[in-house]
Image (cartoon, rainbow, N blue to C red):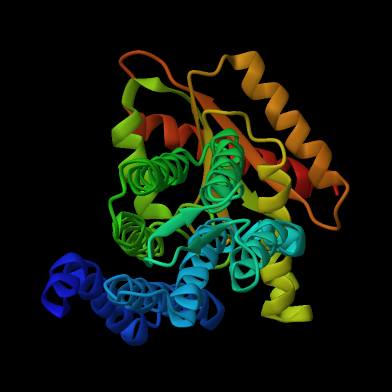
Amino acid sequence: MLHTLLAENFATIMIIIFLMIFIKTNHSFDKNTNRLFLIFLYSLITLLVADGVETYTSTLLHPSLLRVIVSAIGYSLRPFLIFLGIPMLFKDKTRHMFFLAFPALVNTLISFSALFSGIMFSYDENNEFVRGPLGFSTYFFCGLYVVILVCFAINKYKDSNHEEFTIVVAIGLLATLSAILESIWGFSGFINTALAITVSFYYLFLHIQQFKRDILTNTLNRRSFYLDADKYGTNITAVVSIDLNNLKQINDTFGHAAGDVAICSLVSSVKKNLLKGCTIYRTGGDEFIILCCQKTKAEVEKMLANITATMNETDYSFAMGVAFCEKNIPFDKTCIKADEEMYKNKCSQKSSS
């Protein structure tokens, strides 16, 4: 029995152990992020233990209270683990956690109803599993959370975060396939392995993203700008150069924390008005570049007008220059032209003030 359990769960156990080591030794993320991943892994370990004990008690001649308890734990944890993926994948949705946790709570209550009712499951006198009227409720709630994950992922896609959208959809599909294999064909351990693999992959994805983004504004950094410029190539139709005004004065007068607020205010104004296919990069302290792919001159100019209008509602100002790509003009020359236009705009603002 022990030999069989180890054979079935060895890969999952190894993945969990090495991810835990990586999390404990990785200081790239804040404590809350690491804590959330560790809660997930501890819950997954609990699920593995519960499944192992349930497998052992299934070999006994007569049903036992222990088998009912560990089965209820297993059924409770499956949707709960997928639910934990929501704050892990979408930190901006944490304000909705109470409502999002409600299905997992209902599933837990239904699962533990097996202690006094067979509405979800029970075991007959020969210790055989008997599925009740709500026997598939756990898989229903798993599917519900997968749907929620995909819906949130679609919003990521709308925000031009295509990489994360792809990963979330892949996680959802793998979780769905695992649930189907377990519920219909009776395979065991598939959800456990799928969850261990997906959470490990996502943690590594986040780790890589740390090196692509600016820590203050969460915009892509200078290195990402060069990589994307090469990647998008001729699809780039316009380059926008942006520079925040009076950052040194803000830092010297009110401190660097105030300067950070000003920078974030600029980024927020830009992101609110970015068109699909346009991406902002922080290329310097208060310097940003927007790459516009497959956008017409009219579309870009309207977007910039909207950015300016939003920024005018804040306490800060910025200079901006745009250069449209032309055939036979090297990309670096277009960037230089955008910078030149931005500096002209800055000088014009200074002369008129």
Front-lying residue, 180 or 238:
180
| Left or right relative to 61: residue 147 | right
In terms of depth relative to the viewer, which is nearer, 259 or 65?
65
Q: Position of residue 84 (x, y in %)?
A: 55, 64
Please give the name of the residue rendered at 66% of the width and 44% of the height, measured from the top-left corner. 271
Q: Quadrant of residue 244?
A: bottom right
Residue that sits furthest to the bottom in the current view: 24
In which quadrant is the N terminus drawn?
Answer: bottom left
283 left or right, relative to 245? left
What residue lies at 83% left-to-right and 37% top-to-bottom? Answer: 309
User: Residue 8 at x, y = what percent?
Assistant: 18, 65
Q: Residue at x 32, y 86 (%)?
A: 25
Residue 152 percent location from the top left of the image: 60, 44
Residue 51, by quadrant, is bottom left
Closer to us: 306 or 210: 210
Q: Report whether residue 311 is seen.
A: yes
Task: Please state the horizontal and vertical placement of residue 165, each as a whole percent of the image.
Answer: 47, 41
Q: Is residue 319 left or right of residue 352?
A: left
Toward the viewer: 275 or 41? 41
- Can residue 88 be seen here? no
- Quadrant location of residue 9? bottom left
Q: How many dots with numbers?
A: 0
140 vs 302, left or right, is: left
Above or below residue 146? Residue 65 is below
Decide: is 174 above or below 121: above
